[in-house]
Amino acid sequence: MCSAKTDVSVLVCMDSWKGSLSALEACAAVKRGLGRVLNPEGIGMSPMADGGEGTLEIVAEQTGAERITRRVCGPFEGRETDASFLWWPERGEALIEMAVCAGLPLLREEERDPLRTTTFGVGELVREAVALGARRISLAVGGSATVDGGAGLAAALGWRLLDREGRAIPLGGGGLDDLVRILPPADGVREDVEVEVWCDVTNPLLGEKGAAAVFGPQKGASVEDVARLERGLGRFAEIVKRDTGRDVGSVPGGGAAGGLAAGALAFLGAHLVPGVEALMRITHLAERMRAADWVVTGEGRFDGQSLDGKVVSGICGLARGSGARVAVLAGSVAVEERVWRAAGIRCVEAANAEGLPMEEAMARAEELAEAAGERLGRRILAG
């Protein structure tokens, strides 16, 4: 270990590496690598998320919230799963992570089908939180397997989404084709619960940058499926506007989680916030960052989306006010140097520097992240 530069203070704020490492595992691996050349006592960790999978665990670990578990609908109708949310009874607040019941990690790759996957289970968790007495609900909506516009969420909360015959439309994005009318719950619409949606993207519900076009293929949609989903979401937005008075088609962030964010706007009167900013607030990251010389962040793939509402962009924004220098360590890097420098990033390190095949790199992610941490530590020492 290098005995010089012991005064260098580093805060490691990694996001998860999807399919390989949790945020905590990524932080720990990078910290071990940095600790080979920097004083380990000067290296802190604050695992991060942007509202996607892992958000619940990070908040639970740092706040000591009560965990409530319920049996709810999984990504497909008829497939139930045990899902938890966080509960602070003293202040009537709940945090729900949609990925625990409607997330891509719950499906094998060959099962991905946004024409059938549903947010119904998310609505059931919201219903359970309200039954406990929740006055405020935060919905973390990244990592979804769905493109149903939040129609499943609405159905679970008692909204009636009907076809021409007055029957409930099928669950899943494909069911939006049949929608002709939306009726409120028979017992009325509750307006005494404040809902905040933690978004990980700024995409709208519709259009070339919308939920179907951008995220549908990641969730198993073919070219034909994307076109069908776009038509269905357009129909959904039109009928939502007519029957609820809320225009959700072009709201920035409305396309998050396959349009669940737009559905929360329509059916819960929610407001949308960047997930990474909400998590940074809860974990008091600004205070910790002010004491750091460097902050190291990153995810499995550092690409254009990383600088648009994701953890990396949030860390960069916070660092501007703290004076900490930002380094990105990611599994792979697909951002040009001029772009990341313009974002205020001082250096970038790829874990898969040898260009290993994806499957091998993912299997060795912990080892590669640790080695990259050591390389980054040497670059920090070199200034």
Image: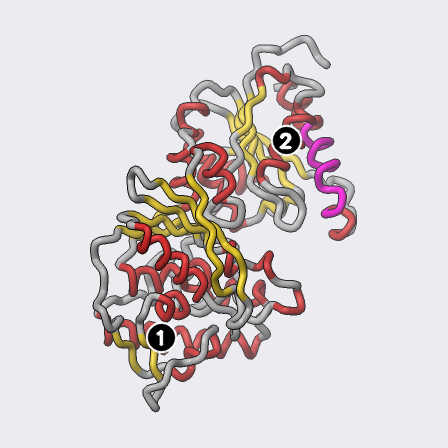
Q: Residues within 10 Å of mark 2 (few under 14, many from 20)?
A: many
Residue 105 position in % (x across, y down): 60, 56
Q: Which residue is mark 1?
A: 236
The residue tagged with tag 2: helix, strand or loop? Answer: helix
Residue type, numbered disc 2: Ala
* Closer mark to the observer between disc 2 and disc 1: 2
Residue 95 visible in image: yes
User: Which residue type does callout 1 highlight?
Assistant: Phe
The secondary structure making up most of the magenta span is: helix
Extent of the magenta region: 362-373
Confirm whether residue 114 shows in the render: no
At 40% from the left edge and 62% from the top edge, which residue is drawn?
A: 124
Above or below residue 235? Residue 20 is above
| N-terminal label among 2 and 1 | 2
Q: Position of residue 375 (x, y in %)?
A: 70, 27
Is 46 located above or below residue 100 in the figure?
Answer: above
105 vs 37, nearest the viewer: 105
**Residue 147 x, y percent position in the rendering:** 47, 68
Q: Image point 40% across, 73% down: which residue?
A: 233
Badge 1: how crowded within 10 Å, few (<14), some, or many (20+)? many
Residue at the top extreme, as displayed: 3
Quadrant (top left, top right, bottom left, bottom right) of the C terminus: top right
Where in the figure is residue 337, as x and y percent of width and height?
Answer: 59, 39
**x 41%, y 64%: residue:** 259
- Left or right of 175: which side holds 304? right
**Residue bearing mark 2:** 28
